[in-house]
Image (cartoon, grey):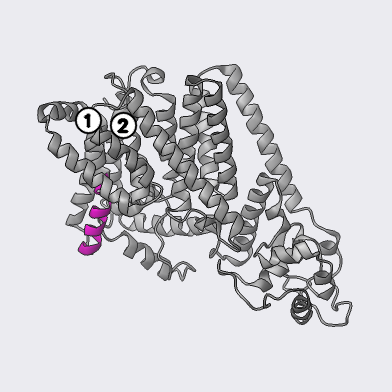
Amino acid sequence: MIYIALLMILGGSMVTSVWLANLVWVLLAANWLLEGRWAEKREMASESRLLQAFVCLYAIYVVGMLWTENVAAGLRVLQTKLPLLVVPIVLLTTKPVEGRARQLILAAYVGTVVVVSVIGAVRMLTIADLPYREAVPYISHIRFALNCCMVIYLCLWGVRRVGIVGKVALGGIVVWMLCFLLLIHSYTAMAVLLVVSTVMVVSRRRWVLVAIWFALMGIVAGVVLYEIRSYYHMVPQATAPLMAYTAEGNPYEHAQDGIIENGNYVNNYICQEELREAWSERSTVPYDSVFEAGYGVQPTLVRYLNALGLTKDRVGVKALSEEQIHQVEMGIANPVYVGHNAIRKMVYVMLLEREYYVHTHAVKGFSMLQRFELWRATWQVVKANRWVGVGTGDLRTELHKELAATDSELKDQDKMTHNQYLGFLATFGMVGFILVLLMFVRVWTGLSHMRIALSPVMLAWVVTIVVCCFTEDTLDTLAGILFCTYFLYLRKTKCTSIIH
């Protein structure tokens, strides 16, 4: 019962409290030591290929201390990643949880994620200018989004096993999770769900269903292409000869830097003098003030007017309604962002990032572009240390040396690779990467009758981990490590399961 209770608490603390999650995994280890049954545990460990892979993974970090220069940083890495060793040892050498106990653990986990998502939604809707990354106050919004995906898998997995009331409840949770992911702009989660859905459909080998699925994906692709064309469909003002003066006779500024948003050039037709005066007449928010998210009222107002095809002068500001003025005061730079078309919003955000990168090479404030910059710098570290890497504690130092050498906008920011595979390559080189890869491939190839041995929810979980590691440093935080290890208790008891 202690083991079950600790699993229930760990599932909840994983998305609510780093301190409690750390305490619980330590208590799990202590309980494992006190319960004994060493012969049984040794036998399970010797037969578990997955446990051996996790042990190998942690051992690589230990061995990497031999050539690291920053020993203190390396020791911190080993401490952070200790649950990556301990949690699999405990879960994979303990009998799988079955029946009522499993249902209680899953209910506690799903319930906690739902409650936290509601808290996040309330914060987003009630706190002015709250960045979506801070919607959930307890955990990174990206890590939480992965847990939302897991809740979706669990609900879809369990919907066939409950009555009509249960089906309605689980279906409602799935719909809510999807809405919440859109609310917090989780592109990573959406990409994960798309890949997982495709894998699940194809793995069933029902070709009519596969054809229907890819037809739906074709429709989505068509919608995305339509939105791209809409974004670049130039308004008449953008294609007409540039006017030199406003209606009041003041000169316009035309940057002509080529940055397009909503079919118009963002930095053309700007008259700062008229904008300042007209804004002061319409709003009590100072024109030169900066929102908590780090961007100012002035560029927000310019982009908002631009998105509506208005000139950035007194005439443009006067044309705004009171509701539109309020949206600018809230830090909304494009009316598309408050619409109900989630696909349009995602496309417009990504295209704006592309515009700024192509024309100014700016990456600050743009999450995807920052990833590209970090991947570029990490790859340079990989090429300079291709065989055994830089060692357990030196990746951060070497990455920021590369960013500084190229005078990157990110050189003064404390960011890591945002790609677990590249990060591992840079840290341990080809030798370490291939060794760990072979250990986990050994687990996969050891499965017999894959569709029977690997339950749908476990397959979805594995694919989620594989996909999210392309864009995140999933194993660099406790929340990410627990997401990659906690659900091992869902394994099957048969010897052909994912574990043996």
Q: Which residue is mark 1?
A: 94
Quadrant in the picture for residue 284: bottom right
Side (left or right) of 2 relative to 340: left
Most foreground residue, 329 or 451: 329
What's the residue at 50%, 59% (across, down)? 370
Image quarter of the N terminus: top left
Q: Position of residue 59 (x, y in %)?
A: 20, 45
Image quarter of the C terminus: top left
Circles 2 and 1: CB atoms closer than 8 Å: yes
The secondary structure making up most of the magenta span is helix
Mark 2 or mark 1: whose residue is earlier in sequence: 1
Q: Magenta residues? A: 71-83
Q: Which residue is mark 2?
A: 489
Please say if 208 is above or below 43.
above
Magenta-drawn stretch contains 241:
no
Please say if 388 is above or below 394.
above
**Label placed on residue 147:** none
